[in-house]
Amino acid sequence: MQLWKGRFKKELSKTTNDFNSSISFDSRMYKEDIEGSIAHATMLGKCGIIEESQAENICKGLKEILADIESGKLMIDMEAEDIHTFIEGELTARLGDDGKRLHTSRSRNDQVALDIKLYLKKEVVNVSNMLKDLVKVIADKAEQYSETVMPGYTHLQRAQPITFGHHLLAYGEMFLRDISRLNDCLKRMDEMPLGSCALAGTTYPIDRNITKELLGFDRVTNNSLDGVSDRDYCIEFASCLSIIMVHLSRFSEEIIMWCSWEFKFIELDDAFSTGSSIMPQKKNPDIAELVRGKSGRVFGDTMTLLTIMKGIALAYNKDMQEDKEAIFDAVDTVKMCLTAFTPMLDTMKVIGENMRKAAAGGFINATDCADWLTKNGVPFRDAYKATGELVARCIELNTDLENLPIDEYKKICDVFTEDVYNAISLEQCTMERKAFGGPAPENVKAQAKRVKDLLNKD
Ligand code: ARG
């Protein structure tokens, strides 16, 4: 059923109706559509644009429709043009003339903008809460593994010793930034567009502040053209979601590597791993791989939104109906990823011995050896060169800095004493990295606490 019958003599063809219809993907906003309509009708009644009794009737009817949809008594008609049409049509079928008054001083253009905002405002909070759960797991694990030494990498080459807790908290920082980005996005989208009508506002004496208050928005949109043609909030939210996926994907990549026999730093719980149909020995990190793969979908959704919007003249154009599938898919995907990722991380087994073993190889303490010389008066550049020669000598003798005899040290630089062995022990190397922001266990514990306090604050 179309609402715009009067002008037309013929029925819409079935194929055109299917092509034009958005109900298959906008029906999920039925609650927001009804909530918006209740606020609108209440405002119309308060401003004397319709009778108060008519407004009450409309609100009662809308609440009944909501209850009937939720109980399954009323099925949403998938032949309808969109969710707005369906609900208004159902209201009119139930109330007659009063139902027909609901759309006074409103257009589907401001209605749909309102519905999306109401829907997304909740989803921003949902995603943010899921991220908080993830950061909590990260902080707990960081505390638990604040003393677990592992190699830190650059170029995927062992570089300097760090602690596993410190490595985890790096992701904690990323997700905290994501939470703060979502907060900003929420603040910006908290503007109520209803009252923009089709594009040019209205001649009715509406009070947009009443609707704004009823719907819990911070403020009303300032320009009717912008009010109906703005989708920045979809693009901005999708961008936030894309950055979240970058972080989840990088984390997944590391988890995949850490699970491999080459690393074996962690083992994922059976409940979050899969097997191979042919290779009986396999235990695959499919969840992490899927999360890494699904990042592509979310980036694609963001690009879809940007492309939809870039060429449309003001104000509403039907292109904008394409916004919903993209933003909903991005939201659904990120939520799905987080639902799987957080418990996967929470249940992983950490194999500290293997991390330590890996940290013991690769001359990871060479910087500390050079630093020891520097602290004993040798200029850093000379110390760096001497240590390079030591490493070369170790390779020749097939040994490492810990086991190279002191004579060999002295041959290269006579400042060396036995004390150097203490400075280059892995535990010492990590413990001493206590400049603010570094991997020393005491720092990691303090940072984990800071993160947890931050989470507990809101
Ligand atoms: N289903 C439409 C959408 O999602 C609702 C707005 C329709 N407005 C219009 N002028 N045809 O964008």
Image (cartoon, rainbow, N blue to C red):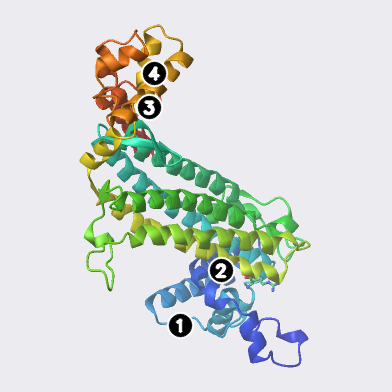
Crowd tier of the residue under label 1, counting other residues whose Cα lies within 10 Å: few below 14, some 14–19, many 20 or above? few
For the residues bearing labels 4 and 3, Cβ distance under 8 angstroms? no
Q: Considering the numbered disc 2 on the image, is that residue within a helix, a strand or a loop?
A: helix
> From where the camera sits, is residue 457 visible?
no
Mark 2 or mark 1, which has the lower sequence index? 1
Q: Nearer the viewer, residue 359 or 321?
A: 359
Q: CA distance from mark 4 to mark 3?
A: 14 Å
Q: CA distance from mark 1 to mark 3?
A: 76 Å
Q: Amino acid at mark 3?
A: Ala
Please say if 367 is above or below 449: above
The residue that label 3 is drawn on is 392
Q: CA distance from mark 1 to mark 4?
A: 74 Å
171 displayed left or right of 61: left
Where is the N terminus found, in terms of image quarters?
bottom right
Which of discs 2 and 1 lies nearer the camera? The answer is 2
Q: CA distance from mark 2 to mark 1?
A: 21 Å
Crowd tier of the residue under label 2, counting other residues whose Cα lies within 10 Å: few below 14, some 14–19, many 20 or above? some
Mark 1 or mark 4, which has the lower sequence index? 1
Q: Label for residue 325? A: 2
